[in-house]
Image (tube, rainbow, N blue to C red):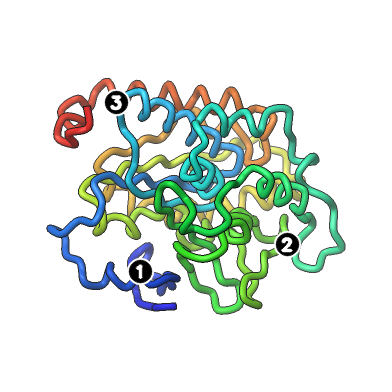
Amino acid sequence: MFTFTYGCEHADLNITGLESFKIICMNNTDFRYKIGLVLSGGGAKGFAHAGVIQALEERGIRPDVIAGTSAGAIVGSLYADGYSPKEIIAFFNKTSFSKFATLTRLKGGFFRIDNFKRALKSKLRAVNFEDLKIPMYINATDMLHGKNVFFNSGPLLDVVIASCSVPIVFEPEEIDHIPYSDGGLICNFPVEILRNQCEYVIGVNVGPIEMDEKEKLTILDIAQRTYNFMRKANVLSVKDECDLLIEPPSIDKYGMFDAEKNQEIFQLGYKAAIGILDKQQELLDSMKII
């Protein structure tokens, strides 16, 4: 594993795999990919990612590489594995937080997500990153050393689960004897891992901007609010690095665990993307993809 300092709130990031070594030698005029797609974390709000991807596909836009964290890692890995946006959203039909999470004895979180892990394993055709149809970077937080780590090679499933394991709520996922939790803790919008590799970067940020003053403070609500505060802080500095930024309006009204509202959130992302793409014809022409 090669390790070097690389952006995202100036954190020391680890990037696994031999392919990462090539990034060091690149400059801004020697792009490895044409279009990169960055998908933020956001819990159930991440269903909007699938809606945005649907809109992009309808405009003939397909990314050459994807970076995702937490919910973005889930949607991104399924898309990179060959599933269509509508197939991805169908996977979560008739689901809920309780279906995928089971109460645990506070070893490292209130809930385990073994049920979700089994369900995702049954869907993913790719066993390793190298099996994906589209190259993918996924980040998670090394809870032992306090570092943001990007993965782009080796076993896929454990990394996806680690990236979406919200601290306190879910137990960390152990990879090579190191506990990993949600990548959004340090880098919720991993733009910089793709910025120097791609001529164009499309970013989809589904993180909330404001919280509802009337929000009830159950244990899940407190965890969600704490997570959102940290996530907001590490997103603001990188949004301007996107050539095209899509932030679905009114996304704040959905909670992190509103999985049963997947169709609504999908449509919200789709409509937001269509509205922005309709105003960006010049940029789309410059991408030479339509």
Q: Which residue is mark 3?
A: 277
Residue pictured at 62% horizontal, 61% vertical: 158
Residue 154 visible, this orientation: yes
Tag 1 or tag 3, which sits nearer the N-term? 1
The residue that disc 2 covers is 171
Instruction: State the CA–CA distance, disc 1 to disc 2.
Output: 29 Å
The image quadrant where one finds the C terminus is top left
Residue 94, x across and y down, in percent: 73, 27
Left or right of 6? Residue 81 is right
Regarding residue 209, the answer to whether it shows in the image is no
Q: Nearer the viewer, residue 210 or 147?
A: 147
Residue labelled with disc 1: 20
Point out residue 228 in the picture as x, y percentages from the top left corner: 55, 49
Percent of width and height locating residue 24? 26, 72
Q: Is residue 217 above or below residue 86?
A: below
Q: Amino acid at mark 2?
A: Glu
Q: Say what amino acid the circle numbered 3 marks.
A: Leu
